[in-house]
Image: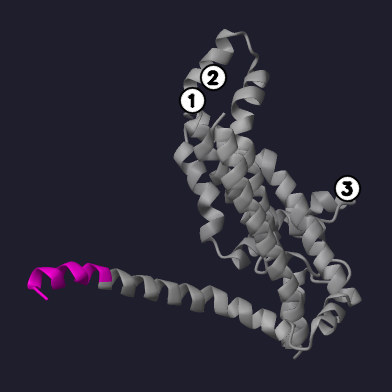
Amino acid sequence: MSHAQAHALHPARTERTLRSLVFGYVVCLVAMPMLAVVGVGLSGGVLPLWSSVTTPVARSAIWLTVWTGLIVALLNVPLGTATAWVLARYSIPGRALLSALVDLPLAVPTLVAGVMIAVIYGPGSLVGETASAWGVQIMYAPPAIILALLFVTLPFVVRAVEPVLEQVDPAEVEAAEILGASRLRTFRTVFLPAIAPAAISGAIRSLGRAIGEFGSIVVVAGNIPFETLSAPVYIFGEIESGAPRAAAAVSTVLLLFALLLHAVATYVEQHLGARDAQR
């Protein structure tokens, strides 16, 4: 083999090595831990797993996690879309600061986020005392859980919708305005078909993020069984109590739910989004 041929083969060998290293890295970091959790959860069979996740405490914790996550996902659609609209459509003072604040939940430790919420809405705070005077309990109750989840999931819908808004053709907006369409009708006919898949996908991914949240919830929820004990905190408690199989069983349910949400969000992005882009 000539020197030129050996040199030509060298990049291909380097690429194969790099691909193998990256594949092995992702498998070890993501796939193997997931398989290990599922393996422990199913180590006794399906019936023991089902028995573990249908105990009264586990069932209550899973239900609390699901319904609070659903509320947060639904709230993120209008609130996240409105935030993305302001960032994409308006040149306002402090826009860069607002954009940075949207990404802040990705950088702030979730435990710190829980402490911040406790300081603002806790029993000794002005907001907490005012709410208590009106008979509304925020801390150590579902409202605190929803506030914490809204904080940690803030970027999902905003960052999904914002680039889509920026790609909307100004000519379509001008055409709608020339034809006499109101702002509401322009939004409904021009913007909404474009941003709906992104908003739905972002909401689904925020739900997936919400069902796994631990750090902020453990601070603000109170973690009372049958009232404010979420599934991730329940899993932590089972591990601390020396019941790893029960923890793995509930973890398996949450993992399968998260994978299902990821598949649905991917479908929305690839199919509904592509379909709307072709219109």
Which of marks 1 and 3 precedes in the sequence? Answer: 3
Depth check, mark 3 against mark 1: the one in front is 1
Name the residue carrying label 2. 173
Mark 3 Cα shell of 10 Å, populated few (<14), some (14-19), many (≥20): few
Q: Which residue is drawn at 48% across and 72% down?
A: 26
* Residue 40 position in % (x across, y down): 70, 85
The numbered mark, 2 or 3, whose residue comes first in the sequence reads: 3
Q: Does the magenta stretch include residue 149?
A: no
Query: Marks 3 and 1, how far apart in space?
Result: 48 Å
The spot of residue 143 in percent (x, y) is: 79, 55
Q: Is 184 displayed left or right of 269 in the figure?
A: right
Q: Tell me if mark 1 has few (under 14), some (14-19) or many (20+) residues whose alpha carbon lies within 10 angstroms of its own.
A: few
Q: What element carries label 1?
A: loop
Q: Evaluate if marks 1 and 2 touch, with contact meaning CB atoms under 8 Å apart.
A: yes
Residue at 44% in and 72% down: 23
- The answer to whether 98 is drawn above or below residue 262 in the figure is above
Residue range highlighted in magenta: 1-12
Q: Looking at the rendering, which quadrant does residue 62 occupy?
A: bottom right
Q: Name the residue under label 3.
A: 134
Instruction: Say which of 191 and 215 sits in front.
Output: 191
Q: In this view, does 276 lie to the left or right of 66?
A: left
Magenta residue check for 5: yes
Q: Which amino acid does label 3 sit on?
A: Trp
What whole-number distance in Å separates the C-alpha atoms at marks 2 and 3?
A: 46 Å
> Relative to 28, is 75 on the left or the right?
right
Alpha carbon of mark 1 to alpha carbon of mark 2: how far? 7 Å
Residue that mark 1 sits on: 169
Residue 101 spot, x, y in % from top left: 53, 48
Local secondary structure at mark 3: loop
Q: In which quarter of the image is the C terminus?
A: top right
Q: In this view, does 241 lie above or below 195?
A: below
